[in-house]
Image (tube, rainbow, N blue to C red):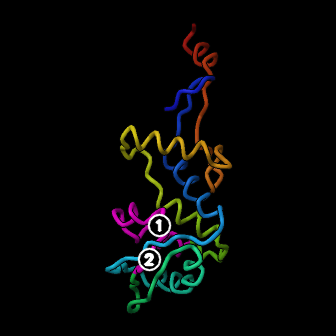
Amino acid sequence: MVETEEGLEIVDQHVAHERVLFEKFQEGGEIEVQRFLIPVQVELPFDQAEAVREAIPALLNLGVELEPFGANAFLVRGWPLALAERQARLGFEEPLKAVAEVWRAGNRELLELWREVACAAAIRAGEELSLAEQEALVAAWKSTKEPARCPHGRPIALKLTFPEIREKLGR
């Protein structure tokens, strides 16, 4: 929850973080990549592995460096710097599965792939954040170009004005 001069905002931290990550990509320029000293092996189901294999050139433009490693496995050699530390803790399987599903659905636009990578890499609803992390997320979210909606179109926050709150509480 965020207090503003007008009232309160109930913020969905997942979609707020997703918006922040997505806009980092949209800023343009070359994406900084964190290259790993020791590549991370990720194994996917066969159909998803095939889709990810086809998506490798597009993923490279997003800062995702993959190398096929057998029939269903990949070596993750690099990841967008803005996402690398957190994603290394969470693992790379979920974002790659999300990319596979988008690719298999026939959507090969880089922005759609980035939406899925940003969504998979964003903090989860209910994940505990320190006060400093909460403040940093809110500041980053408030400075985005489109703070009302996530890249998929979902609202990020529910706003309640102080008059609305008073009315609902019968004051």
- In the displayed structure, would residue 37 be above or below residue 70? above
Residue at 65% from the left image edge and 62% from the top image edge? 26
Label 1 close to label 2 by CB (< 8 Å): no
Residue 34 quadrant: bottom left
Residue at 61% from the left image edge and 13% from the top image edge? 167
Residue named by callout 2: 78
Residue kind at label 1, given as amino acid type = Leu
Residue at 47% from the left image edge and 67% from the top image edge? 81
Crowd rating for badge 2 (residues with CA inside 10 Å; few <14, some 14–19, many 20+): many
The one nearer the camera, 92 or 144, is 144
**Percent from the top left, x then y, of residue 103?**
59, 77
**Percent from the top left, x then y, of residue 58?**
60, 80
Badge number at residue 81:
1
Which segment is the magenta one?
A: 76-101
Q: Secondary structure at mark 1?
A: helix
The C terminus sits in image quarter: top right
**Percent from the top left, x then y, of residue 114?**
58, 67
